[in-house]
Image: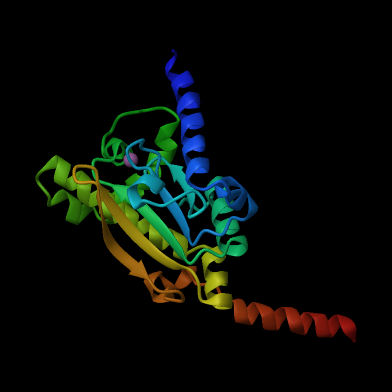
Amino acid sequence: MQSYQKLLLENKLWAAEKVEKDPEYFNKLAAVQKPDFLWIGCSDSRAPANELTNTQPGEVFVHRNVANMVVHTDLNMLSVLQYAVEVLQVKHVLVVGHYGCGGVKASMTNKDLGLINKWLRNIKDVYTKYEDELEAIADENDRADRLVELNVLEQVRNLAKTTIIQKAWANNQMPYLHGWVLDLKTGLIKSILEIQPGETDFIEKVYRYDFEKLKQAEEKLAEVYQK
Ligand code: CO
């Protein structure tokens, strides 16, 4: 049997097992999607959202890319974020990095890696921001692990800089933002920061949008046109 055929066979066994335990399992699952969590994690095969958190299908909305990045021009990530926040109305957005991340390690080298240079550039920018702290760490692996943590911190900050999150905070006080780091050696996730809804102090002033003023301006404009 080819390796991919085993996947399809395992899928049949898994589905049969679920139905055996609960004949209505897939009917219930197909009917509604209302997860409380958006997980933005690394594509690394050792960092699967559901297995790590012992959650079931339907519980976690997932987006993964190399080194769990929140890049403000990434339409893929932004589309997932908008849908999760505005339609699914998730209560928590989790940015989940992991120690030993290949993407983070690659960003610390001077190698030309082709197209992915452009993606890793975003992590290099985090490195530059914390250069003094990072270069004071002698051990290369320790330095990479610290950059993993700082990268998670900055990606949570990038979330808070989006109008998607800021509008949600202005309208309905959700979601909470979390920065987590997974230790592959123990399987344990460490929380490194939690941002309350509306905690805009967390980002520099220039990134904070003023929706109230915008609303007032729109109303004034509407009045002018009515006259
Ligand atoms: Co990784």
Residue placed at 47% from the left, 31% from the top?
A: 13
Q: Nearer the viewer, residue 207 or 190?
A: 190
Image position, residue 171 (x, y; %)? 58, 76
Vertical position of residue 162 compared to residue 75: above or below = below
Image position, residue 225 (x, y; %)? 87, 80
Q: Nearer the viewer, residue 193 or 54?
A: 54
Residue placed at 73% from the left, 78% from the top?
A: 218
Residue, far right: 227
Q: Nearer the viewer, residue 6 or 18?
A: 18
Q: Nearer the viewer, residue 4 or 166?
A: 4
Residue 68 seen in render? no
Image position, residue 126 (x, y; %)? 32, 52
- Quadrant for the N terminus in the image: top left
Residue, far left: 138
Q: Left or right: where does residue 105 sit relative to residue 206?
A: left
Describe the colour scheme in one phrase: rainbow
- Quadrant for the C terminus in the image: bottom right
Residue 115 seen in render? yes
